[in-house]
Amino acid sequence: MRRLVGIVLVLVLVPSTVAFATDLEELLERSQNASYVADLAISCSTPDGVRDAVIRFSQHGGQIRVGSTVDEDIEVTTGSGGWALTRRGGVVSSAAVDSTEEEPEPLYLVEDLGPVELLGRGAMAYRLVREEVLRAELIFDDESGALMAATTFSEDGTTYCQRQFVSINTSPPRLELADPVPQTEVLLSTPDVETELPETVFGFERLDLYEDEEGFRFSYYSDGFFSFAVFETPGPVELPEGVTVQVGESIYRRAFTVGQATYAWETRTGGMALIGDLPPDMHEAVLTALPGPDASGWLTRLWRRLFG
């Protein structure tokens, strides 16, 4: 689970590189090249309660460092195609990911909302609409190009997550990634591997598929803005902090953390987990399109719990 969580932090906290409009593609590219240090406040209203946090976010020279403003001993560092989770200065876990260049067809209509001001700085605001549903509002800093704020919405118009800089310094010191060499795990894109996962799920395209020597598989999906990862593991995925929920006709374990939702379930061959930044109203449509839980696994565990 440590490796799984590390990859997810990269997916959720780093703005998507997938373009959904020519002008916004340029803005995203400029944002990825910006240099700054910022405190990022995140607050999400989930079916299981509010999840919020303040995160220290630094970017320079294509490298990104994500830390906690509460616990300075824990830090997630990302760079071009990789990440490292460090605790008290030592590398706990790390990986390098080799992705493809494929992009899904844009599903979002981009509306220019005009100039705004945030933290006393000039900025530009945009609205993203998918299938006539407002899904996000984004604010980019004029000077640095950094994505300073992002608000995502559920289908009924209610706010799901708000991410916003509460401070920004556009002249950060040079960042040095933690040395991941001793524990680096390289995941190479393996598009020819056999999988039951569909290529398209509710408008989300499967962009990359990875498999390691232990049979651990990781697939990445995006609709051009939101994204999620599906993990296929040889054994069950434990989610002790989660709750048991029914989605459609199947039973899952679910946990919400800051900016992301995780679902875990057993399959005939091991376990699966879905982790992403999707608003809750998208969860059922995505989950029901994936291979579902193996009912016999749940029944076996229940039988053993009741009768030994």
Image (cartoon, rainbow, N blue to C red):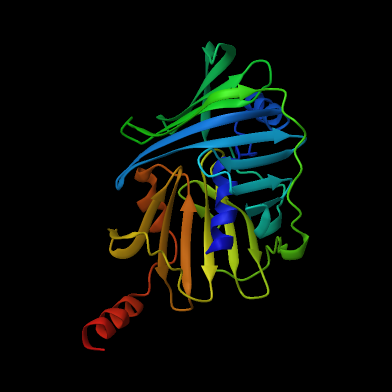
Q: Nearer the viewer, residue 303 or 68?
A: 68
Q: Is residue 227 left or right of residue 31?
A: left
Q: Quadrant of residue 56?
A: top right
Number of marks drawn: 0
Residue 216, compared with residue 17, is above or below; it is below
- Find residue 186 and report its horizontal and vertical position in percent: 73, 62
Q: Residue at x 46, y 42 (%)?
A: 259
Q: Is residue 264 left or right of residue 219?
A: left
Q: Nearer the viewer, residue 101 or 234?
A: 234
- Residue 114 in view in this figure: no
Q: Residue at x 59, y 48 (%)?
A: 73
Residue 47, compared with residue 28, is above or below; it is below
- Find residue 48 and report its horizontal and vertical position in percent: 30, 48
Q: Residue at x 35, y 44 (%)?
A: 281
Q: Is residue 274 left or right of residue 56?
A: left
- Find residue 62 and report its horizontal and vertical position in percent: 75, 38
- Find residue 232 and report its horizontal and vertical position in percent: 53, 68
Q: Quadrant of residue 115?
A: top right
Residue 94, compared with residue 281, is above or below; it is below
- Residue 136 in view in this figure: yes
Q: Residue at x 66, y 47 (%)?
A: 77
The quarter of the image holding the C terminus is bottom left
Q: Nearer the viewer, residue 152 or 178?
A: 178
Residue 250, compared with residue 45, is above or below; it is below
* Most distant residue in the left direction: 306
